[in-house]
Amino acid sequence: MRILVCGGAGYIGSHMSLALAECGHTVEVVDDLSTGHAAAVRWGTLHRGDLGDAAFIGPLLRRIQPDAVMHFAARSLVGESVADPALYYRNNVAATLTLLEAMRATVPRPFVFSSTAAVYGEPQCVPIDENHACAPINPYGVTKHTVERALADYWRAYRLPSVSLRYFNAAGAEAQARIGESHAPETHLIPRVLKSALDGGGPLTVFGDDYPTADGTCIRDYVHVEDLCQAHLLALERLCAQPSHEVFNLGNGRGYSVREVLQATAEVVGRPVAHRVGPRRAGDPAVLVADSGRAREILGWRPRRTDLSAIVDSAWRWHRRPAF
Ligand code: UDP
């Protein structure tokens, strides 16, 4: 099939392009390179442009005629979304609606949407399944949830089939370390810990150690990026066989604390990682762990790289290489 990967120059989109190419699909990437890297587009053709520009995306879709669209292009920093919500509504909502309009004007094709656990907001119970109330607490989560709502409505009204995949904490890099996570600024825990482990990285700040968890630090569900990509392939297969609109959580169902991440990293790199304890970061729930039973049952998803050391090790091999 010919798959359009929106945001294919980014972290998860570039891994998806590799996974699709390995399955024999033809990959077409759209990316404006605002946060992605041209060097990460190695398994597809890059069409540089703005998804929010109807004069760009409409003709491109007509020319490429993709069999399906996977949409990763988005802003994804919670703090930035609070400081500059307009950027998030424009990039994550308006641009996605422009893309969906262009798809409606051609043939409605399966649409796989990169969503987030941030749609749930403060968890009422853990592990979190898809029936948990959606009450996002920042503009990032609101914009992702808004698109999810639009997709449900577009399925009912226009029969545009879609799947929303709610990621928990994406981490790791592909086995050969040709691509990996590279954000500027980097806010995520594992890459920050690895930067601290590298010479000159400076100590990591642990954002609070007074949470109601066993060691006082926050617990998150880290899921390997290659496992996420496998779930997308399965979602695509299902959409092609049984068009509908569905939502799936993607996580390992096992949480690790910040201190456990530091410990696993020390074992992987062979020395302790310098760190200090600072104040809590606003908006961080104590525990976020997924119930991904639905993805396992309905998609047959079986995450394979669930061990924290394996996730950190793959990221470490990427971080030791020169950046893009
Ligand atoms: N964290 C931390 N120090 C950092 C970055 C993150 O202690 O420099 C903590 C953060 O408070 C959260 C966890 O690590 O509890 C995971 O944060 P990340 O930003 O990677 O993902 P999030 O769960 O916020 O999406």
Image (tube, rainbow, N blue to C red):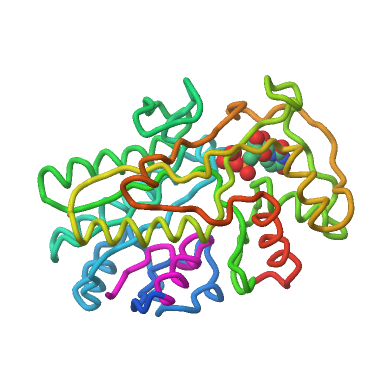
Q: Give the quarter of the image for residue 73.
A: bottom left
Q: Residue at x 54, y 72 (%)?
A: 40
Q: Nearer the viewer, residue 46 or 310?
A: 310
Res 63 → quadrant: bottom left
Instruction: Return the residue nearer the eye: 10 or 197.
Output: 197
Compared to residue 215, the image places residue 36 above or below, namely: below
Identify whether 279 is placed above or below 276.
above
Q: Residue at x 38, y 47 (%)?
A: 165
2 inside magenta stretch: yes
Across and down, in percent, residue 75 comes to 48, 50
In the rendered view, does 241 fall on the left or right side of 121? left
Q: Nearer the viewer, residue 165 or 103?
A: 165
- In the displayed structure, 12 sits above or below 193; it is below
Determine the image quadrant of residue 44: bottom left
Residue 181 place in picture, x, y as percent: 61, 60
Q: Which residues are magenta?
A: 1-22
- Which of 97/274 is in front? 274
Quadrant where the N terminus lies?
Answer: bottom left
Query: Percent position (x, y) of residue 296?
Result: 39, 47
Rendered-image quarter of ligand 1: top right
Judge from the rendering whether residue 239 lies leftward or rightward of residue 32; answer left or right.
left
